[in-house]
Image (cartoon, rainbow, N blue to C red):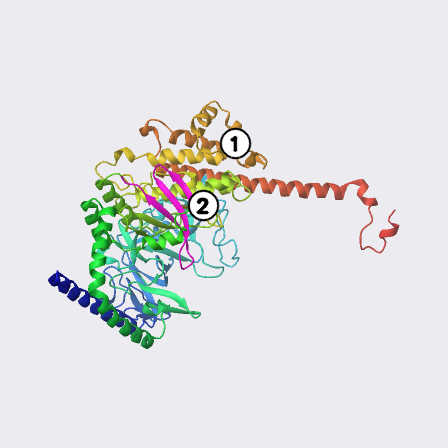
């Protein structure tokens, strides 16, 4: 017993001493004074940031720029273009040809492994034969606000490349030749400025682990095949690349931007060093007694919390590899007031979700995950790690998790405007109009398509319902409540999950139309829709508004819901098709709303004109006229 006590005491003293050294080193460490470009390269007024470079040792292969007369240049297809701007996802070049229009053959570049034509570009097409199908109503051409561009012609057509109904990522501008267009021009950033073409850039994605730094996520490119970019996680600043600046801690302190260790709240370093030195001696004296007691308690606690030794080994391995924040059970218990029932916002077969507030004032949702086996726990931990690396504006950000009790507790951000379910049932807010509803649906479908088709391996939600769609104050949708306890990640046995989310979003579509909860809704609504009696199920809140601008889009969404809720999985559309159909319905609704407002404006102006032309109106005194009193 004495030998055991001596051994434990020695180990504890060594541990305390090591902890003391690490803490002191951390406190005495100099904070990063700022974020500096790796090679501090500039060409004229433009900073050359990684992965772009002028010198061979300062960037990534394929992003070499030239510098001539203080002007950066980029070479594409043996042609040299002037670089106007470099941003985190694109590089802008001075467009070839005149300031008005050019022939598609003047710029035949479609893309390569480093660059693609960005969907941010808006183009003006001239004298197209099929102008009616190509023109877009909700975009502005480059010349609408600029009378001095010098473009003369019969007709022009505005087309944003983000529409992708005719132009697809990877296409060149020659695709518009099929519409008989006689010329093109590129939208200027502002009236009078030079036309500029945005090229999306990305590095080859063959080894994202070696490209991105710690605290960075890899983001798939839109127009560059198999290309990625690195983006720092929230709370970090930099370019995200391992060979570039990387990602450093960023915060505001005393009204100024601060980086690195200076972001940690701490008092005077010398005072803390004295305090730590004092408690070190006291800790050493109590070490032997406390160690024996704690070992006894911990042994009992481990047996109770982690009865399965395989679970324990999985959790230990997960903690070593997991990059997001690891919360303690005590932190989450305090945040949820002891997981009080009043804090619970969702309870179903997948687990429970609680609302909470962390010490820093952040509002979070905390998911208590159920898993039925050792195999289930492994998949849960795998999916948590995958979700922690996702950055998408319509997916609730996974902030961290807690594994103190074996079954994970997962912490997500919590927007403060309630859930879609609460707004549809008017438990919160004053109701949602049709355009807000269709916009929420479109964003949710796009986010699910992103998880399924742009993430490798794909991620399935598996628990989509209106109660898991969270809303910001501007009604931006954020998906939460992932079915983490199921086979969330694609694997050899994922085929049965292939169209699960498509089925679920069909149910949400019916809720959007009817405003009713999901219980018993699907069967009843489907019968009405198939019998052509859709409007017997429409939410009365929508019917109180002018329904003329909703009918066509609402019928499109109802038909899509029927397809999604098909019993046969093969008959359901893919999530990509769902997103595209909802986008069309959203565009129809916006177009109908504009037309409705134009008709209302025209009607009001016509009424005023009729009143002014009425014979009776000549007997109405003119206010402010000197002869008004004697007009009769």
- In space, the residues marked 2 and 1 are separated at their CA atoms by 32 Å
Is 518 on the left or on the right of 546, as rendered? left
Residue beneath disc 2: 342
- Residue 538: numbered disc: 1
476 left or right, relative to 270: right
Main secondary structure of the magenta stretch: strand
Write the residue at 50% across / 44% down.
137
Q: In which quarter of the image is residue 546?
A: top right
Q: Give the percent coordinates (x, y) of residue 167.
A: 37, 44
SS at mark 2 in the image: helix
Sort mark 2 into few (<14), some (14-19) or many (20+) by Cα contacts within 10 Å: few
Residue 265 position (above or below residue 491): below
Secondary structure, mark 1, is: loop
Give the image quarter of residue 603: top right
Label tally: 2
Comparing 610 with 428, the one in front is: 428
Q: Can residue 40 be seen in this view?
A: yes
> The N terminus lies in which quarter of the figure?
bottom left
Q: In the rendered image, is residue 180 in sight?
A: no
The residue segment tinted magenta is 344-371
- Hey, which residue is sitting farthest top in the picture? 531
Given residues 464 and 27, the one toward you in this image is 27
Q: In this view, does 153 lie to the left or right of 11?
A: right
Q: Up-down: is 161 above or below 150? A: above
């Amino acid at each position: 017993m004495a030998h055991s006590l001596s051994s434990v005491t020695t180990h504890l003293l060594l541990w305390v001493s090591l902890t003391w050294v690490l803490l002191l080193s951390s406190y005495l460490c100099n904070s990063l004074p700022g974020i500096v470009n790796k090679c501090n390269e500039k060409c004229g007024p433009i900073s050359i940031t990684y992965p772009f470079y002028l010198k061979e040792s300062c960037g990534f292969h394929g992003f070499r720029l030239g510098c001539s007369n203080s002007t950066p240049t980029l070479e594409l297809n043996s042609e040299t273009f002037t670089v106007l701007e470099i941003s985190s996802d694109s590089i802008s070049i001075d467009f070839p040809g005149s300031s008005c229009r050019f022939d598609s053959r003047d710029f035949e570049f479609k893309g390569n492994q480093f660059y693609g034509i960005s969907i941010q570009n808006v183009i003006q097409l001239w004298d197209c034969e099929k102008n009616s199908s190509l023109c877009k109503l909700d975009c502005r051409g480059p010349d609408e606000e600029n009378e001095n561009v010098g473009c003369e012609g019969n007709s022009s057509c505005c087309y944003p490349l983000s529409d992708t109904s005719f132009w697809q990522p990877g296409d060149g501008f020659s695709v518009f030749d099929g519409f008989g267009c006689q010329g093109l021009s590129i939208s200027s950033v502002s009236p009078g400025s030079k036309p500029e073409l945005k090229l999306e850039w990305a590095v080859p994605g063959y080894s994202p682990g070696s490209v991105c730094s710690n605290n960075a996520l890899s983001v798939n490119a839109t127009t560059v095949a198999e290309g990625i970019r690195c983006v720092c996680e929230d709370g970090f600043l930099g370019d995200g690349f391992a060979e570039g600046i990387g990602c450093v801690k960023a915060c505001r302190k005393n009204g100024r931007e601060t980086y690195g260790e200076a972001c940690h709240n701490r008092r005077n370093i010398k005072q803390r060093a004295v305090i730590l030195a004092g408690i070190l001696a006291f800790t050493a004296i109590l070490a032997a007694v406390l160690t024996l007691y704690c070992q006894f308690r911990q042994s009992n606690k481990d047996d109770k919390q982690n009865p399965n030794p395989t679970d324990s080994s999985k959790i230990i391995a997960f903690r070593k590899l997991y990059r997001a924040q690891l919360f303690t059970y005590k932190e989450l218990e305090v945040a949820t007031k002891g997981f009080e029932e009043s804090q619970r916002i969702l309870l179903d077969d997948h687990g429970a979700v609680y609302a909470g507030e962390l010490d820093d004032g952040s509002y979070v949702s905390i998911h208590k995950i159920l898993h039925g086996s050792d195999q289930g726990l492994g998949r849960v931990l795998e999916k948590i790690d995958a979700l922690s690396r996702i950055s998408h504006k319509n997916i609730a950000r996974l902030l961290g998790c807690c594994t103190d009790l074996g079954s994970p507790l997962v912490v997500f951000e919590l927007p403060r405007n309630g859930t879609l379910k609460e707004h549809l049932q008017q438990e919160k807010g004053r109701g949602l109009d049709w355009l807000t509803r269709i916009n929420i649906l479109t964003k949710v479908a796009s986010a699910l398509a992103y998880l399924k088709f742009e993430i490798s391996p794909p991620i399935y939600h598996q628990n989509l319902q209106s109660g898991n769609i969270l809303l910001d104050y501007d009604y931006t949708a954020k998906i939460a409540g992932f079915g983490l306890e199921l086979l969330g990640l694609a694997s050899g046995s994922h085929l049965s999950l292939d169209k699960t989310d498509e089925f679920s979003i069909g149910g949400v579509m019916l809720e959007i139309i009817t405003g009713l909860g999901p219980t018993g809704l699907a069967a009843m609504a489907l019968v009405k829709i198939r019998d052509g009696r859709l409007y017997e199920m429409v939410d009365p809140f929508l019917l109180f508004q002018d329904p003329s601008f909703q009918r066509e889009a609402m019928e499109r969404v109802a038909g899509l819901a029927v397809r999604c809720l098909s019993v046969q999985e093969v008959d359901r559309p893919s999530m990509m098709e769902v997103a595209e159909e909802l986008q069309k319905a959203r565009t129809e609704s916006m177009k109908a709303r504009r037309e409705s407002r134009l008709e209302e404006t025209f009607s009001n102006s016509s009424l005023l004109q009729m009143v002014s032309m009425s014979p009776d109106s000549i007997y109405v005194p003119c206010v402010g006229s000197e002869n008004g009193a004697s007009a009769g």
